Amino acid sequence: YNANPESTRLLIEELIKLAEEYPVVLVLGDMERPSRNIERYARRVHRQIGEKLAQGNFVHVLAVGFWAREYLKGAVGAGFPPERITYYRTVRAAEKHFERLLMPGTIAVLKASIYTKLRRLRINTIGDIL
């Protein structure tokens, strides 16, 4: 339940390698609590993480939260296929899509700060959860 730019970047670097051999679905939530005081910083670091995502062959990326739209902008801007990344403002909105992405053998990885409440995402047991 913790995410910051460095830990998220390191995770994605490892997942890029993993996605070369296994189907990986990544659910990324906000790394920062919404606040006007950090808006420029938050948008920048979330967009940079999105750019890093473009290096991976992920089955799909769900971007969830207030700043998470920047993941999508960064990823698509860096060449990630737009049909393989989806933005949702809330966990509840992302649930049905997430469930449809999990197939036997799928590795699902969730990463976000605790306030994003990804723990509320109902996870089916058909995938391997890291």
Image (cartoon, rainbow, N blue to C red):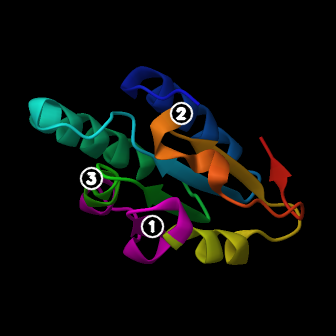
- Residue that carries the numbered disc 2 in the rendered image: 13
Residue occupying image coordinates x 31% and y 63%: 76
Mark number, residue 124: none
Query: Residue 85: x percent and y percent?
Result: 45, 67
Q: CA distance from mark 2 to mark 3?
A: 18 Å
Element class at badge 2: helix
Q: CA distance from mark 3 to mark 1?
A: 11 Å
To which quarter of the image does residue 90 belong? bottom left
Sequence order check, earlier mark of 2 and 1: 2
Element class at badge 1: strand
Amino acid carrying mark 2 in the image: Glu
Taking the magenta stretch, the answer to whether it contains residue 88 is yes
Magenta span: 74-92
Amino acid carrying mark 3 in the image: Glu
- Picture layout, residue 94 above or below residue 35: below
Which circle, 2 or 3, is nearer the viewer?
Answer: 3
Disc 3: CA contacts within 10 A as few (<14), some (14-19) or many (>=20): many
Residue occupying image coordinates x 44% and y 56%: 64
Residue occupying image coordinates x 70% and y 78%: 100
Sequence order check, earlier mark of 3 and 1: 3
Query: Residue 128: x percent and y percent?
Result: 85, 51
To which quarter of the image does residue 99 belong? bottom right
Residue occupying image coordinates x 44% and y 69%: 86
Mark number, residue 70: 3
- Picture layout, residue 42 above or below residue 58: above
Q: Quadrant of the N terminus?
A: top right
- Picture layout, residue 56 above or below residue 97: above
